[in-house]
Image (cartoon, rainbow, N blue to C red):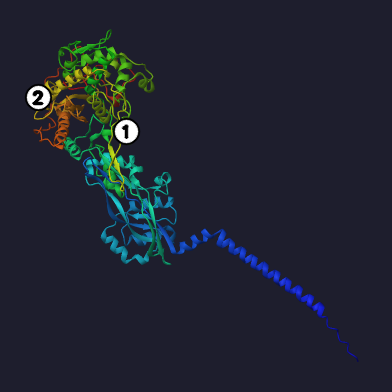
Amino acid sequence: MKIRRSIKDPRGESMLFRRRALAGFVLIVLSLCLLVSRFVFLQVMHHDEFVTRSQANRVKPRAIPPARGLIYDRNGVLLADNVPAFRLEVVPEQVADMPALLQRLGQVVPLGADDLDAFTKQLRQSRRFESVPLKMHLTEDEIDRFAVNRWRFPGVDVVPYLTRRYPFGELFAHVVGYVGRIDASDVERLDPKRYQGTSHVGRSGLERSYEDVLHGTPGYELLEVNADGRTQRVLETHAPTPGRNLYLSIDVRLQKAAETAFAGRPGAAVAIDPRNGQVLAMVSVPTFDPNLFVNGISQADYGTLTNDPDKPLYNRALRGMYPPGSTVKPFLALGGLEYGVRRPEDTVLSTGQFCLPGQSRCYRDDTRGGDGTVNMVRAIEKSTNTYFYKLALDLGIDRLSAWMSRFGFGGKTGIDLLGESEGILPSRQWKAAHSKFGWFPGETVIAGIGQGYWAVTPLQLGHAIATFAGHGVPYQPRLVMATRAVADAQVRPLPNPPSGPSLIRKSSEWDVINEGMRAVIVSGTGKLARLNDGFPYLIAGKSGTAERFSRTSEAYDTNKNTAYLATRHRAWFMGYTPSDDPQIAAAVVLEAGAWGGTDAGPIMRRIFDAWVIAKGGAAPQDLPLSAPGSSGRDLPNRGAPNENTPNESTTPVEDVPVESDPAQASSSDGGTP
């Protein structure tokens, strides 16, 4: 059988090869294009992202919080410092089981309930890659124990930081304030970039008011870490910008003298330079230790402070509101001169009581039988109620409130401290907003002696007397007089120009009031307290004793001891010196004092003594402070009310009468005899 062989086709084979080769080449080119595209996508389009991911496995950024600005007094004495300390921090993303870790960690480093509570709150608001403080201010023993067991706690480390310290403790608690740990509410309101790595923020006082100035700007450093997250070396460091330092106008010596003079009695004092508005002293008693709050106050300590009946956390100088009593009389007399309703020589007959036409109830004077015929100077010296009852009526409540508001009553003084109270200035507008009744003439009468609806803060009265002492030129009170950055060679003063022109038209009008306030010291209540004895300059001032409670059935018994009277009165004294060229003005209030002159006056004198010493003068003759129960012994008999005079007193602001005409109630003097 014959086999037929196929004929070879070279041409077909060549075509087939070329087709196959072309298909393979196209596949190779497409694969290369796809590969190049992927390379472009990864290496070009997403270069930054993958470099960051790569670096994140090797390089760890860590925020460097800025050093908080320091706070000094006017002479460079340090009031708020930064001291090195160590804290325990946790990075949440490096912890698989947080509750178990905290339980094991607590066996090495004691963790209190306050620490865990603060950590839990901040953990909810922080990012998982950011470290969260767990325990502040570790002791050396705690640091050593953790170092030995460091390997057992991934994501936990001891971190150095600067913590706040207040060297003077309680002395500046209400002025400087304190910082506290950042909590969940702070995380929501604070700039996360600016506060990255920061664990504390200003809570009160100047620490809070000047937070933006004190805080600074954070820096950062890049750390090379191993697979366990342990730091190997620092690759880059970008230093933070520290906060600016604050220089206060307050003098530590005046501040200490004022607090010591209170001897623990609740009250407040403010001293101001009338030439520029600088606050020289600002004291609220009782006070507290701000260092307790820095790293988290314990529940026990906080409970002790909040349950204290004397309320040490309350800033009385800034927020305390009290009826001013007779301290408003010099300002009212000046208003009478300014409005032309009184001349200095005009006289009023004081018979012991003042009655409104058509009313049977009358308003008492301080002295039984009255002070006789008094002019303006004599009325200020004797604190004659009748004179100011009539002056208030002649002015009318509208002009009275308008004039007193110019001295800062009924509004904020504008001091550079948050939380200031506005107080209450009696007016038709104020009552219309708080009562359905209209304004009664009797309310005008008692407003003339600083009682009734009146409520002022010690800062307001200090600002008012400083404005008068400065011949009517108003300045906003200022605590911070300069700032300084670390890089600055010099301190930068903060300008504080007058907030307006002088409130007094004629210098002769100032002279009249000054003469009256000088007479208070020479022959009035200041003489009884010997406020100018042994002092190198002339002092001018005015006392005030505002009643705390109304009397309904109890007669005003002037023979009762001062320990009893101290439970009824707010004792005030305000003044300035030298009286012919005032350089310091002060206002003092005791929440429980028998009389303004003999209880509050010596506190003001102690402030003035410290001021003389601070100026380089010799220490003035020591003036003994009055002891509770003794301040009324040298006082004249104030006199019992006339038998036709009701035994009722104007109620203070805590119990303002709004359901009846206060004109039907009598008033004892808000001031001293």
Q: Nearer the viewer, residue 224 or 575?
A: 224
- Amino acid bearing label 1: Glu
Q: Quadrant of residue 17?
A: bottom right
Relative to 100, 528 lies left or right: left
Helix, strand or loop under label 2:
loop
Helix, strand or loop under label 1:
loop
Number of the label disc, if any, that sits on residue 407: none
Number of the label disc, if any, that sits on residue 634: 2
Residue under label 1, please give it: 420
Q: CA distance from mark 2 to mark 1?
A: 37 Å
The image quadrant where one finds the C terminus is top left
Q: How packed is label 2: few (under 14 Cα within 10 Å), some, or many (20 or more)?
A: few
Residue drawn at point x = 41 percent, y = 53 percent: 123
Residue drawn at point x = 26 percent, y = 61 percent: 141
Q: Nearer the viewer, residue 410 or 28?
A: 28
Percent of width and height locating residue 521 = 14, 23
